[in-house]
Image (cartoon, rainbow, N blue to C red):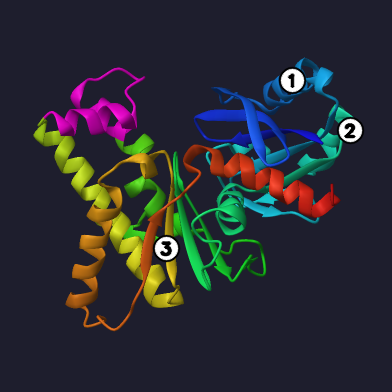
Amino acid sequence: MTLLVCDLGGTTVKFGLYDKGRLFNKSSFRTPTTWEEMKSTILNLKDHFSYRGLKGVALSCPGAVDTKKGIIYGRSAIPYIHRFPIQDELSALLELPVTIENDANCAALAELNLGVARNASSSVFFIIGTGVGGAIAQGRNLLRGEDHFGGEFGCMILRDGLSMSKLVSPVRQARLFAQQYGYPDTFSGKELFTLAEFGDKRALEVITEMYDYLAIGIYNVLVATNPELVVIGGGISARADLIEQIQQRLDALLVKTKMEDLTYRIEACEFRNDANLLGAASHFVERYGM
């Protein structure tokens, strides 16, 4: 069974083919600015890979996803995908079964089934990209919430009315840095980290604040849910210093608030940038039993 799997992000759309637990033909394109353009691009991908005998299309999406109704509620960095029967519309267009699932839930499913969370009794997930997605799991069961907003950690207010997504996203911080210091619009989060590594004090200050606020957000979830495991995903999870930097800050916060008895483990996603694609495929397989 071969699936077309797509991860719709605020900046880029990653895609690939999935078969028997393996991803291949992976690539990406810049996120379209309209729904019509997005549909056209996905249709072109389906046609391009038709020789593989595709059995369906599995999507990882931002927002509060109602997987039963096939509708995305809430808000996200892709405003045109919300509040209409997107799953049914795509299925009719592509003439294939289509599934949609929240992007952070997809990453969680990949890690729960095959990755670092497979043996955890309870876990929380922070997926960092253009925004911050999140997921909560008890065993292997995702806690979705009454209105599908369970785990939307990026909406957490951390400072002066600013959300975790605005304060922690490398994409957003790079954009602000570029505007403030005259870098081009294409300036990326990766370039921001590179500047900091080469000793740019302005970039280092931004990165330090990002880590500080990420630790505060994780602390808030730790004391609210007391999970065994914290998992961090997204492009930032590939950074060698990330877990150590966040763990140092978390431990300091726990001491400061006299919560030293609260224990936790923290890990980076095993599947890194592939987690959302693998989780989207897992969701499709669970639904259709293929």
Q: Which residues are magenta?
A: 174-198
Residue 197 in magenta stretch: yes
| Picture residue at 89% right of the left edge, 33% below the top | 92
- Asked if 147 appears above or below 263 in the picture, the reply is above
Q: Residues within 10 Å of mark 2 (few under 14, many from 20)?
A: few
Label 1 is placed on what type of residue? Ser
Q: How far, Cα to Cα, is label 2 from label 1?
A: 13 Å
Give the structural element (helix, strand or loop) at label 2. helix
- Residue under pointer 3: 230
Label 2 is placed on what type of residue? Ala
Q: Quadrant of the N terminus?
A: top right
| Picture residue at 47% right of the left edge, 42% below the top | 272
- Residue under pointer 2: 92
Residue 181 position, x and y percent, is 19, 25
In depth, the one of 149 and 234 nearer the eye is 234
Q: In the rendered structure, are the residues bearing label 3 and label 1 in contact, judged by CB atoms less than 8 Å apart? A: no
Give the structural element (helix, strand or loop) at label 1. helix
Whether residue 83 is visible, yes or no, is no
Q: In the rendered structure, are the residues bearing label 3 and label 2 in contact, judged by CB atoms less than 8 Å apart? A: no
Q: How far, Cα to Cα, is label 3 from label 2?
A: 39 Å
Return the disc, 3 or 1, that comes first in the chain's sequence: 1
Q: Residues within 10 Å of mark 1 (few under 14, many from 20)?
A: few
Residue 40 is marked as 1
Residue 36 in magenta stretch: no
In depth, the one of 142 and 147 nearer the eye is 142
